[in-house]
Image: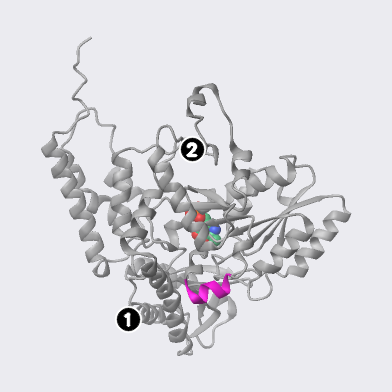
Amino acid sequence: MSDSALGVLELSTEEMRSLGRQVVDLLVDHFAGIHHEPVGRKVDCAELQALLGERIPEEPSDARELFGQLKEQLFTNMLHVDHPRFFAFVPSPNNFVSVMADALAAGFNVFTGTWLAGSAPAQVELIVIEWLRQICGLPETAGGLLVSGGSMANLTGLAVARHVQLQDELDGAVAYISDQCHSSVARALRVLGVPADRTRIVQATDEFRMSVDAIRAQIAADRSAGLRPFCVVANAGSTNTGAVDRLREIADLCRAEDMWLHVDGAYGAPAVLTEKGKTLLEGIELADSLSLDPHKWLFQSFEAGCVLVRDRSLLLRTFQVMPEYLRDTQGGSGEINFGNYGVQLTRSFRALKLWLSLRTFGLANFRKAIARGIELAEIAERELRGSADWEVVSPATLAVVTFRYLAAGLLPEEIDRLQGRIVEAMLADGYAIATSTVLNGRPVLRFCTINPRTSNEEIRETIRRMGQMGQARAPR
Ligand SMILES: Cc1ncc(COP(=O)(O)O)c(C=O)c1O
């Protein structure tokens, strides 16, 4: 056998350094210049196929040249969720330290599934999880792990609920969720085998929060029908309006009913670091399991979600399997094999970015950045209330405000259609982007303002442009 394949996937040290500098320059230009760039664009499939589609290349190309084309080909043809004028969905205003940490995690290709392969990285994850536990006020028995995002965190928390409460026996099992829950909650229950007709969707009638009496009444009805209520999912910052369910009352109900409380704080939970958020999120510490996403309001790059479980041993009970080829990974006490705490065995080093970001900037600056997001939504609300063209549908809550453009003399259905037209116009314009949702059966526009780089002026200018778009598109 010859060694002829030895160098085939290698770059020289000079080429590596040069490519690395090119990448860092691209990123620094992106971070430094983002206010002056458009929020991005959505491109149709045919155009992208023409631009990017090519046959699988048999022969090599120059890496610098390929990387040099990326900005034009890819990064201008997408929406920038980290852009200070990206107000749609839940933005992800990541930070540069997090980006560099991810480069290192990928570069050293860190494996965090077992202590044997990644002891120091596992210790870093333990430390980060402990910080998040303290931030959320869960007891010392709590622990958890980093996962891909909120969807996986919800799935993981609910898998533990199923195992502990039902011993994975789904006959008659019933879960209770809010009509304001994120879609990933219903999907997680479906994946876990809870039939849709036994996922009770409780109407969130009071400021988009579930009525605890309604949950109680439904549980009683289900018990009398011989069913097995096992879990309530409450919101700690709903995606639609930022609403927080009455966590303490729901926790009391769950204790009394011997049920599991899963709290979805995927985007909202980090607000507990601020004065306002702490008051709103009172009771979050009572969750049996809690989702929160560092890739949302803790300013990390994708992918970084987290699930915390009040009794961390339950994660192991739910997920541990020990095949013969992993027997060498069984170590002494304190050696955590994160691959046994969730679904993923091979997992990347997500903890590094949060660990380095928190140490670089300090928690006090994270508090300020989160508080700024809350303030920006309040600024938007004041601006909207200052004009008769706008109706505020839900007030600024945990950095989310929803509103409708109103034009005099239009029918309600015409006003409904106008909200979607404003979103389309924003996409075409590229200055800023907001998206719509539906509240009380009617389309509304929505801002999520968790990006601390957004200026007051950018909020005002966005609303001014949206008003103009509404005016120009209103039927006459
Ligand atoms: C409240 C809530 N839960 C869950 C999710 C899903 O998170 P991910 O997209 O990270 O899977 C989101 C996403 O916006 C969310 O806002």
Horizontal side, residue 90 vs residue 72: left or right: right
Instruction: Tell me where the magenta segment starts and ends, as one range.
Output: 274-281
Horizontal side, residue 403 vs residue 370: left or right: right
Q: Which mark is residue 335?
A: 2
Look at 48% across and 69% down and name the residue there: 420
Foreground pick, 335 / 179: 335
Q: Nearer the viewer, mark 2 or mark 1?
A: 2
Q: Reply above or below: 359 against 323.
A: below
Horizontal side, residue 167 vs residue 427: left or right: right
Q: Is residue 280 magenta?
A: yes
| Quadrant in the picture for the N terminus | top left
Image x and y of residue 470, in percent: 43, 79
Quadrant in the picture for residue 279: bottom right
Question: Dot 2 lies on which element?
Answer: loop
Image x and y of residue 168, in percent: 71, 40
Question: Mark 1 or mark 2, which is nearer the start of the sequence?
Answer: 2
User: Which residue is label 1 attached to?
Assistant: 457
Disc 2 versus disc 1: distance between alpha carbons?
A: 51 Å
